[in-house]
Structure formats: structure tokens, C-alpha cells
Amino acid sequence: MTDLIEALQAPTADRGTGAVRTGTPVSRVDGRAKVTGQAKYAAEHPAPDLAYGVVVSSPAAKGRIVSIDTRAALAVAGVVEVLTHKNRPKIRSFDIAYKDMTAPAGSPFRPLYDDHVMYSGQPLALVVAETFEAARYAASLVTFEIAAEPHGTKLSANLDRAYKPKPLKAGFEPPPDEKGDTDAAFDAAPVKIDAEFYSGVEHHNPMELFASTVIRGEDGHLTIYDKTQSSQNSRWYVSHVFGLSKNKVTVRNTYVGGAFGSGLRPQYQLTLAVMAALHLKRSVRVVLTRQQMFTFGHRPETVQRVKLAAERDGTLRAIWHQAIAETSPIEDYVEVVVNWSGLLYACDNIKLDYKLVKLDQYTPIDMRAPGAAHGVHALEVAMDELAYALKMDPLALRLKNYAERVPIEDKPYSSKELRACYELGAKQFGWDQRPLEPRSRREGTELVGWGMATGVWDAMQMFARASAVLHADGKLVVSSAATDIGTGTYTVMAMIAAEAMGLPLEDVTFQLGDSTLPVAPIEGGSSHVTTVGSAVAGVCEKLQKTLFKHAQKLRGSPFADVKLKDVEFVGGTLRLKHRQEAALPLSAIMNDSGLVKLEEKYLMLPNMLKQRKFRRLVHSAVFVEVRVDEQTGMVRVTRVTSAIAAGRIMNTKTATSQITGGIVWGISQALHEESYADHRLGRFMNHNYAEYHVPVNADIHAMDVIFVEEDDRIVSRLGAKGVGEIGLVGVAAAISNAIWHATGKRLRSTPMTPDKVL
Ligand code: MOS
């Protein structure tokens, strides 16, 4: 166990941190390792005899490879091999359809499989050399002759091909059946809105590039450092693709420099690195370039239409929400875009519709708050439009239609403190000072506007295992194959365990990021705290019981005649609640019982029978101030207040960081991020940080985060619901609504760049 801690560089809190409570702000235990460069990422692990692979990407969007000329590349000093579909190793399992744990319906992409080119940027060759430089240079010398076929990459030109996807993805809920008679209700209502929305492609750009370092042991065992949101998913994938048994492959992801969904599926650099390592019988590393980060999935281009109808007093009569999004020729990538419109506002007539169009692109992949980022955006801008049509305050319209039970299905919410989000957020922001009329405030050269929106996301719980080992010196090691993509998993799990066992935080290490550890789900959907956190709480409870039993058996034990409920674990001791001087240090119990270590394992299964009686969601209310320069069309988001209802917050510092990160990304979605495709080439053109814009420090101003009180024991035993994606949802809509309030101009597509604002 200790060996593994070192191999995994599992971080532990600094000496002197002492006891901390969940629900308080605690600095991340991996912070020092990260800012000093000691934390090693996937591309940083050394190996003797390491070879370097560089991917050569397709210049064509669709067609057949007629020939590949690798002679010049192979002539470069230091080049070991150039792998293509022609000479790749023959692997039987590679020919059989395989899937990763998160694959949508369809047939997953296999790099270097055959001569088919299905998208621009598709990996067509891997150049392997003794040095990265040699590989990179040689890669530039590989040439292809491709018989091009006509391609279609433009969503708007292919909408007539839209079809309803089969709901085959785990966790994907297709739109529910219509409630009431939406068309009739819409026609009959006195006030209505009918609006179309367009959201362009966004690309995942975490700081850390996608990379896999495959270290081949002398016995042929592969230890793979992979950038992924699940070491076990990557391990499972490698085993299936290459026909390697579980004990022949270990995948680690001890540190991940952001992923935001792009690491939910194994990416092609992993396949290629393993393929080369097996073929060459040596260690191989493959790192994608920033350009290649635009070739493995993206947030899909989506068009939407929302129709809302209401009585003159604001009572909603009809909600109709349709979305059409793109997917690839090989898979039906699905996300929940429209269903949110059946969950937020009380309404008797709701119709929801979601379709896909196949384009000659790679399969899209989840990006932070997948589906909600687009769907809730459209709904919340439409709600703002409706409020103006009614001459009603946008917040008052939402309160007027506040849902106490889930509108689209006959279920209660497990908890819903959205009203408190509205109230506290509005108060903090000063919303009551807002004039209703647009264009009513000018300061200097800028128009000032205020907008708001509601946010919603799932509160999910999966299943997980955890183990805990208490050592004789009182140190506790808790393990699960979880992931920390920068969200604070190391810290929060250690906090939960330390609190349960009454230990100072520095005596607890949580180890994650290794496929051999107890089963954990993929870190996605903001579900790690509810899932892994509950497993940690569960294993600690077992440890408490066992330790208590040992303590009872000690000679002259003060606990001999009491029950577990009469004792508490505090200050590194077990003590009686009513006679606190009767305390035994945990290390003394261990030593006096002759125990070197005490180990417990726990399987956390969600109580699905109970959970399914409730709709389990997290909510937010977002209030935004923008300043718009009418001369230049520049928009500044000068103030954001986000009030969040997400159950108990385990660590208010890391949770606040999640929300401010989401706000920054919401600003990015609203004003900056845009992929330009040249549809003649079928290619994303601005595939670099210079031309694909993300906000910089100067774009980000005041951000206030409020967590309203909520405690949800249906979602998890901790009362937590999970904090992550919710920070993003609704932010861009609130910005759009604020731009309307500032300028009187309604913008329905993102990003809202100066050309649209003017
Ligand atoms: Mo997130 S899109 O669940 O990584």
C-alpha cells in the first residue's frame, strides 16, 4: 500500500493542518505538488528506452487512402517506424467491434483501421522515433494520396436529414412524451414567443494536452500514464482493443490538468501509443498537439427553437422546445438538451423534441454541462423574451411559474432550494434597483444592462468501492480508482475520511488514479462527491465499528459496556461522548490490540428504489451586469452573482472554485469561443489558442458565489448533490439577457461577438 502511495505520488495535507470540518474552506492537498511542478502529468513520466510517437493527421475530410509515402520519414535519423493502416500489427480484437464504457450507440472510431477517411484531422499515421524532434520532423514528411469523396460538415445545410436517435447511451434520457396539448395551448394563449437559437461548436482546451506514456516492463506488463477521466475506463478499453488480460495492463491518471468531458472516452493517442509499444516491444509516448486537440470530439453545433405561451398575468400555458444537433457518421452522440424545459417551470402543456444529423466530423463528446449548456440557454433567453412581451420583471416571471413538483412527470424533487437562490442572489446583486426598460442606463461610452437566468443540472449518484487501511501509527490511507481532474477530489475525499475518523487532515491520504484500486466511476456529471464520497463515508463507518470492537476488548477498556453511539472519534482518539477524558488514541488501540494495520472494504450502491421516486437536480440563479460599448460592440461582463443550491457543500473553497470556473466558461461561451469551419475543406480552421478565443484575466471581473442551504439525504448519505457543471449553466443566457437590457438588441446565437452586438 505504501509503495503504491509513492508510485502514485498521492498528496497529503501539510503538517499542522489539523482537524478540518466538511463544509468549511480547505485548500487543496495537491496544491503544492501542482504549483511546484512536482505533480507529474501523463506526458511527464520517464521511462528507459522511451520512443516518441507523433501523429500525422488527415488533410481530407472524406475519402479513401490510395497511397502513403513514408520513405522520406523513414530516412530521418532516429526514426524507428511509421505505422499506418497498411503495416499496423494485426490484432484480432481490433477487428471485432469494441466499445469504451462511455461509447454512444454505434461503432467507435479505430485509428489506422483501414483506408477510410471519415473526417479532417483523422490520425492516418504514427511516426515513432528516438526523439520527439525527429518524430515531429519526420511526420511532416509523410504524404498521402487520398481519393476524396464529397463531404458534408455544415449543420444548417443538412437539417432535412435530422432523425430521432435511439436512446442507447447509459444515463441518456430521451425526451419524455408530450404533456397536454401544446399546439392548441400555444394557439389559444394571448402572449407568445417563438425564437430560434444557434450554438456553434466549442472545443475542449484544457491546459494539459492529451498524452499517453506507455511504459513496457520486462515481463511485457504495460503501465500506462494516460490523460483520462477514468483510469479504469482506459484500462478496460486497452484490454478489449488489444486483447490483453486485466493483469497485463495498469492505467494511471494521478494528475490530470483539466479535461471537462474530453477525457470521458479514451482518445486516439492512447490506442496509437499502445499499438506502437506492443509492435516495437518498448515504451512509447504519444502527445497530441494543440491543433490535434481539435480532432477528437467537441461540443456539438446545435440549432434550437423554443415556443412559449402565457396568460397576461404571466402564467405559462405552453412550452415547446426542439433541438437538432450534429453527430458523426459512425456514432449517435446524444446529450440531454431539451428535457430541462420540462423540469423547471410549472406548465400543463410541454412538448420536447431532440434530433441528430450525421455530418462528416468526428463524434462529438461531452463538454461541461453537456446539453444543458445549450438547452437551458435557449429556454432562459426565451423566458426573458416572454417577460418583456408581458412587461414583467424576468425574475417575477420565473417566480410566478415556480414549480413545486416536477412539471413533466408526477414526481417531487428530492430537494429544491431554487427559490432561495433567486432571493439571495437578487438581494446580493441588487436586482430590485433594475429598471424594466432596456437602454435605460448609460455610463460614459457604455450602456449598462442587467440580466438573469436559471440554471439546472442533474444530481447523480453511481456506484463505487473504497478501501481504507488504518496503520498502527494512526495514519489512514483511503483508496478508490477515482480521478481528480482539478476539481478537488484528493482534498474532499481526505476531508470526509478525516472527519469520520476524527483524524487531523495530514494523517489521511486519499489515493486515486490507478486502475488497480477499488472500482470507481468515470469522473463525470459532477457525481464524484455523491458517489466516491459516499463510498469513503461507508468504508470509514466500517472502520469505526471494527476499531470500536477492538477497543472494547482491551484490558480495562472504558468502552467495554457502551454502544457505538456513545462514543466519538475526535482529535485522533476514540472517546466517550459523555466523559471525554476517557479517550484512547487510535494508534494506542491499534498497538494494544497487536494490530499492524486494519483494513476495510466497502461497496456503495445507490438506493435506487428510493431515489427513483424523486427528480434529483441541482439549481442556480445567475445575475449578470454587462457594459456594452456601442461604438465597438465590445461587451464586458463586469459583475456576476451566482447562487447555487447543490446540497451540502463539502469544501466551500474548492466548490467556489468550481462555480467561478463555470462562470468564466459561461463568459467564454457567451462572448469568446467559436470554431470556424471551412466547409469546402470540412475542417476547423482556428485550431490554436491564438485564433480560438478564450477569456483572459482582463475579461473577468467581479464574481460572487453564494451557496444556499440545502441538505439532500436522498441523493447521498452526505447530504451533498455535487458541484461542477451547474456553475456554467445559465451564465451565457444571463449575459444574453443583460445585453438585451443594455442595448435593446436580442441575441440568440453564441458567441455574441461585436459584429452581432452592433
Ligand atoms: Mo463532465 S462533461 O461530466 O466531464
Image (cartoon, rainbow, N blue to C red):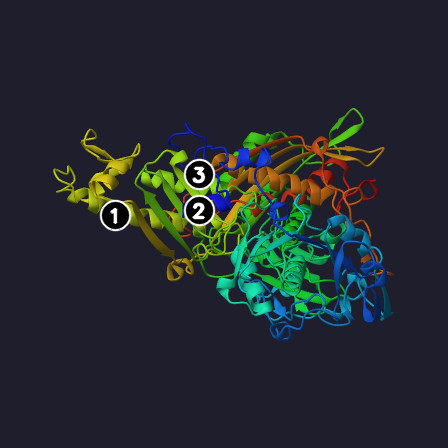
**Horizontally, is 152 left or right of 238 in the view?**
right
Mark 1: amino acid: Lys
Residue that sits furthest to the top in the current view:
444
- Mark 1 to mark 2: distance in Å? 27 Å
Label 1 CA crowd tier, 10 Å (few <14, some 14–19, many 20+): few
Q: Quadrant of the C terminus?
A: top right
Badge 1 element: helix
Mark 2: amino acid: Asp
Give the foreground label among 1 and 2.
2
| Residue name at image x 60 percent, y 48 percent | 314
Q: Nearer the viewer, residue 180 or 597?
A: 597
Residue wearing tag 2: 3
Examine the rendered structure and indicate whether residue 239 appears above or below residue 591: below
The answer to whether residue 200 is seen in the rendering is no
Residue wearing tag 1: 545
- Mark 3 to mark 2: distance in Å? 41 Å
Examine the rendered structure and indicate whether residue 607 appears above or below residue 594: below
**Image spot of residue 186 (x, y percent):** 65, 60
- Residue 709: assigned label: 3
Q: Earlier in the sequence, mark 3 or mark 2?
A: 2
Residue contact between numbered discs 3 and 1, judged by CB atoms under 8 Å: no
- Mark 3 to mark 1: distance in Å? 31 Å
Mark 3: amino acid: Glu
Q: Nearer the viewer, residue 254 or 178?
A: 254
**Horizontally, is 403 left or right of 36 in the view?**
left
Badge 3 element: loop
Label 2 CA crowd tier, 10 Å (few <14, some 14–19, many 20+): few
Q: Earlier in the sequence, mark 1 or mark 2?
A: 2
| Residue name at image x 54 percent, y 38 percent | 643
Examine the rendered structure and indicate whether residue 711 appears above or below residue 109: above
